[in-house]
Amino acid sequence: MTLRFFLLAALMTVAALALVVVPLLRRRGTTAGPDMRSLRALDQAHAAGVISAEEYAAKRAALPEVATAAGTPNRPAFVTVLLVALLLPLSAIVLYRTIGTPEALDPAALTVAAPGGEHGISMDQAVAGLVAKLQQNPDDATGWALLGRAYQAMQRFAESRDALERARRLQPDDRDLQVEYAQALALASPEQRIDGESRRLLDEVVAADPNHQRALWLIGISEYQAQRYAEAIAIWERVLPQLPAGSNVARSIQDRIAEARRLGNLPAPPGGETAAGANAGSSAAADRAAPTGATTAPAAAARA
């Protein structure tokens, strides 16, 4: 548990105690007795001979009793205050440790558990909670987009496609969301190829924003899947100038370009190409480094 949690818990405990203890302190040391103002008036009347001793005794006995504050704390009341101040936070801690979930307050526990794990919050639980919230607020485009990404991470591609479609209907002018939906369409298709409607959506984004990195990246994969290697290289080379030189993303795209040149028997550009592209490695490695945080590209990206 973090220091911030302990400070917050201490403040909440003090506030809770104040609600209980302060009223008790205000009433501490109180005793019940006759109304002193009425008693003084009665004493004066008796001393002046206005009323007899018998009448004085009768009237004094009939005076209403009121609570009066004593000069020193009443011991039973003080003990009560002390017990409340000690037992209230102690009982709260014991109760929480017994039936609460203290491990949920540990940042290390707020991680997605591995399949079959017994601790942490599982992806299925997180998704179920998000689905419940979206049932209450079905117009939450951000929530639907988040659900679509979660389903995609779980390789539940059809559900990812449907969730991202809902998000896109709610925000039809969001180009990033349109690109995500296009990728989800491809992943949910039997061959996981970027063509047809998914390609059309990507082309539409690039027509409006010629430098959209993620759309260009996926269009390059579409050309690569169709064995149009020269076209794929041309698309990816439009992405490279937008990336920091020497970054992991730039090197991954260079690797993919080198692989496309090799598969297409295409000559290297004038001046040669970096050795980084000579050993391209698996296509999945490049996909994981897709520009602007793109998620894994279709698994069939390297298929001829």
Image (cartoon, rainbow, N blue to C red):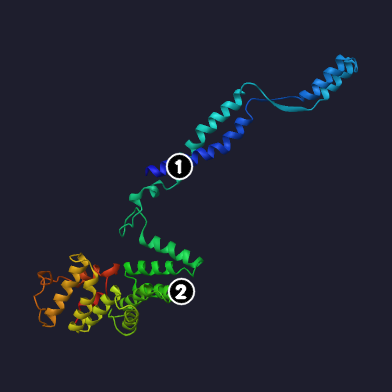
The foreground one among 95 and 78 is 78
Q: Position of residue 131 (x, y in %)?
A: 44, 66
- Label 2 sits on residue: 170
Picture coordinates of residue 85 (x, y %)? 52, 33
Residue 19 vs residue 241: left or right?
right
Q: Residues within 10 Å of mark 1 (few under 14, many from 20)?
A: few
The local secondary structure at tag 2 comes to helix
Identify whether 54 is placed above or below 116.
above
Q: Is residue 170 above or below residue 93?
A: below
What's the mark number on residue 57? none
Q: Which mark is residue 9?
A: 1
> Residue 184, relative to residue 125: is it above or below?
below
Tell whether 137 sits left or right of 181. Answer: right
Instruction: Locate the N terminus and report the quarter of the image it occupies.
Output: top left
Residue at 49%, 37% in the rendered image: 89
Displayed quadrant of residue 35: top right
Are the residues flagged by discs 2 and 1 in contact, CB closer than 8 Å? Answer: no
Q: Quadrant of residue 28?
A: top right
Q: Residues within 10 Å of mark 2 (few under 14, many from 20)?
A: some
For label 1, the SS is helix
Q: Nearer the viewer, mark 2 or mark 1?
A: 2
Looking at the picture, does residue 282 appear above or below residue 224? Answer: above
Q: What residue is at 43 percent from the left and 41 percent from the top? A: 7
Q: Earlier in the sequence, mark 2 or mark 1?
A: 1
Q: Is residue 179 left or right of residue 98?
A: left
Amino acid type at image mark 2: Leu
Between 294 and 283, the residue placed more toward the observer is: 294
Tell me the CA gap for discs 2 and 1. 40 Å
Q: Position of residue 138 (x, y in %)?
A: 49, 69
Question: Disc 1 marks which amino acid?
Answer: Ala
